[in-house]
Image: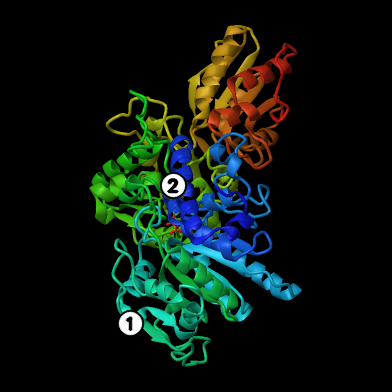
Amino acid sequence: MVAEPAHVKNLTASQLLQLADEIRYELITVLARNGGHLGPNLGVVELTIALHRVFNTPKDRFVWDVSHQVYVHKLLTGRKDRFNAIRTTGGLNGFALRTESPHDCYGAGHAGTALSAALGMAAARDKRGSDEHVVCIFGDAALTNGISFEALNNIAHTTKRFIGILNDNEWSIAKNVGAISNYLNKLITNPRYNQIARDFSNFVRRLPKGELALKLAHKAEGGFKGAITDVGLRQTGSLVDADGRGGYGSPIIFEEMGLRYLGPIDGHDLPLLISTLEFAKTCDQPIVIHLLTQKGKGFDAALKSPEKFHGTGPYDVRTGDALPAKPGAPPNYQDVMGQTMVKLCQKDNTLVGITAAMPSGTGLKHLEKALPNRYYDVGIAEEHAVIFAAGMATMGFHPVCAIYSTFLQRAYDCIHHDVCLQDLPVIFCMDRAGLSANDGPTHHGLFDIAYLRCLPNVVAMAPKDEDELADMMFTATHQQHPTFIRYPRGVAEGVPIKDQPKLLEIGKAEVIQNFSSNGRHKIALFGLGPMNTLARKAAAQLAAEGFDCAIINPRFTKPLDAGTHEFFGKAADMIVTMEDHALMGGYGSAVLELYSEKGVTTPVVRIGWPDQFIEHASTQDELRRKYGLTVENTVAKVKTQFGEATAKVTKLIEVA
Ligand SMILES: Cc1ncc(C[n+]2csc(CCOP(=O)(O)OP(=O)(O)O)c2C)c(N)n1
């Protein structure tokens, strides 16, 4: 397999096809071990080869939306030798990363950013008078995202040279939803809309094998939505009726926005792709090329289950079957959340569930299946999801937005302006609060306590286990204020879940173990959420070493249980706060603020994530060890304070 873009340029047509096969083999075998975005990458093999054949990165710029589909690009840009360690500790990141390669001109992980970023680059290029090409590759689901339309609205009046590639495979993670998705379907299936411009056809005819390529452009391969049998050939501009709005009186939305539209085109036909991109290079007007691709092409299991293979864990390379879970493994938090939603909705008609394109990731698929009329998938549109929920809340409903902590960041103004300011009873189930280890910094949810606790009216909680998650969801349904519940990715603690969840007292912590007052140094350990397990283990170890330990489950980061924190603050010789969140502005900070107000001067050790973006790794435990979010480090910190430490203390953990 070739390793550099320059090599791609020297291959013959048949060698290019062989390269595509080799890349598919590499993707399927490596991801069987490491997991990752298999389906999306199998779908862009030919496209990525064609891009590197026609353009010259790093001078030319490829901007990928989400950038989960850049594995092929990584393989072709000098990272082949490190590909087998993708998404593992010290290995390649699973997304485009500016620090990883000069060929990654723009990093991402969140959807909907590529068109804006690419347009910014094109504007900068025009301003400085250079001549590089900017190519933006975005999926059909990117068009469910508002930012993409904000960018499309700006392209034609900002630059004349912009190449957009719409990679349409009909899928978001789940099946794509909404009017735009239906519209794209219409573009593909209705011959009236299929436009191959005369200048493009002339351009292609002049190329070797051009007639054949053109024929291929005129028909969709089996497996696509519909046969394109009767593609209209039009003179460039023949449909152009300048309407004074920058549009062209065309049924094609891109043309209405002042962009040329070419397509739909078979995105797996390599010669055709190369010709099309060569043509795009010559255009002196922004252009969108609409490609039809198949998510998972080349691997049967992925073709059959596009959702599962969008982002997969390790699998059996022969069958595609997921590796069996450990027998007796606890359920995932996501499933507990989805099943609890079903239970709660069955008893409370005001509840509805809202997801922004993540039915399986959040577990809301359980609700979709059991009670479809209580379930909304709004597309990759977190801002819309939150304001939509606010609207429903004004009508007496109790909407539950299930959104990852990291993706909710995008909707911050909506949380502030629409939900909190109007004090509306929207419930937020913030999944992936904590690390998303293989994905890395774009996906870690380490900032939500900080970004929420400064907002008035907020009730924010974190369960220590899955049973308490159900209690918190139940409690939230009794609230008339914005309520946020943060919980981590993956396997829960394995505790039994009560049939009937119980109502928790708002702002009340749970004292799991009080001091025994045996005359020894008193340590109060406050373990928030899943860190409570570590707090209990640390307490056991400290007790064995002669300390008197109390263990508290804070439950609420807002309102903080001032009474319990103050009581232990005054009674203890040392306080330890433990959180799966950035230290800056997090739960420990809230405790320090409270102690400052109350005049509590007991030393506080805060365990949490330092003030830096945390990289990806094979497992969460590795990162916790590296940054000191461990029992050992907690014990060592306590002992150091009392001058008893022999263990090495991780410097990155602050002692306040
Ligand atoms: C803001 C945000 N919300 C949700 C996601 C989760 N997510 C990752 S990829 C994806 C679907 C992308 O679909 P599309 O752009 O069509 O690309 P495809 O995978 O189909 O090639 C979603 C919803 C995200 N990355 N960013």
Residue at 37%, 54% in the rendered image = 354
> Neighbour class for label 1 at 10 Å: few (<14), some, many (≥20)?
some
Return the residue nearer the eye: 230 or 534: 230
Beta carbon of the mark 1 residue lies under 8 A of ligand 1: no
As measured in the structure, the alpha-carbon distance from the residue carrying label 1 to the one carrying label 2 is 34 Å
Q: Which mark is residue 192?
A: 1
SS category of the residue bearing label 2:
helix
Amino acid type indicated by mark 1: Arg
Return the residue nearer the eye: 6 or 518: 6
Residue at 57%, 35% in the rendered image = 617
SS category of the residue bearing label 1:
helix
Residue 608: where, in percent of width, then height?
Answer: 62, 32
Residue 23: where, in percent of width, then height?
Answer: 49, 48
Q: Tell me if label 1 and label 2 are in contact, CB under 8 Å.
A: no
Mark closer to the chain start, 1 or 2: 2
Residue 179: where, in percent of width, then height?
Answer: 35, 69
> Neighbour class for label 2 at 10 Å: few (<14), some, many (≥20)?
many
Amino acid type indicated by mark 2: Leu
* Screen quadrant of the C terminus: top right
User: How many labels, in total?
Assistant: 2
Classify residue 363 as left or right of residue 614: left
Can residue 418 be seen here? The reply is no
Relative height, residue 116 to residue 42 (above, below) = below
Residue 634: where, in percent of width, then height?
Answer: 63, 21
Classify residue 457 as left or right of residue 117: left
Relative height, residue 372 to residue 253 (above, below) = above
Q: Which mark is residue 279?
A: none
Classify residue 131 as left or right of residue 394: right
Residue position for label 2? 38
Residue at 68%, 48% in the rendered image = 99
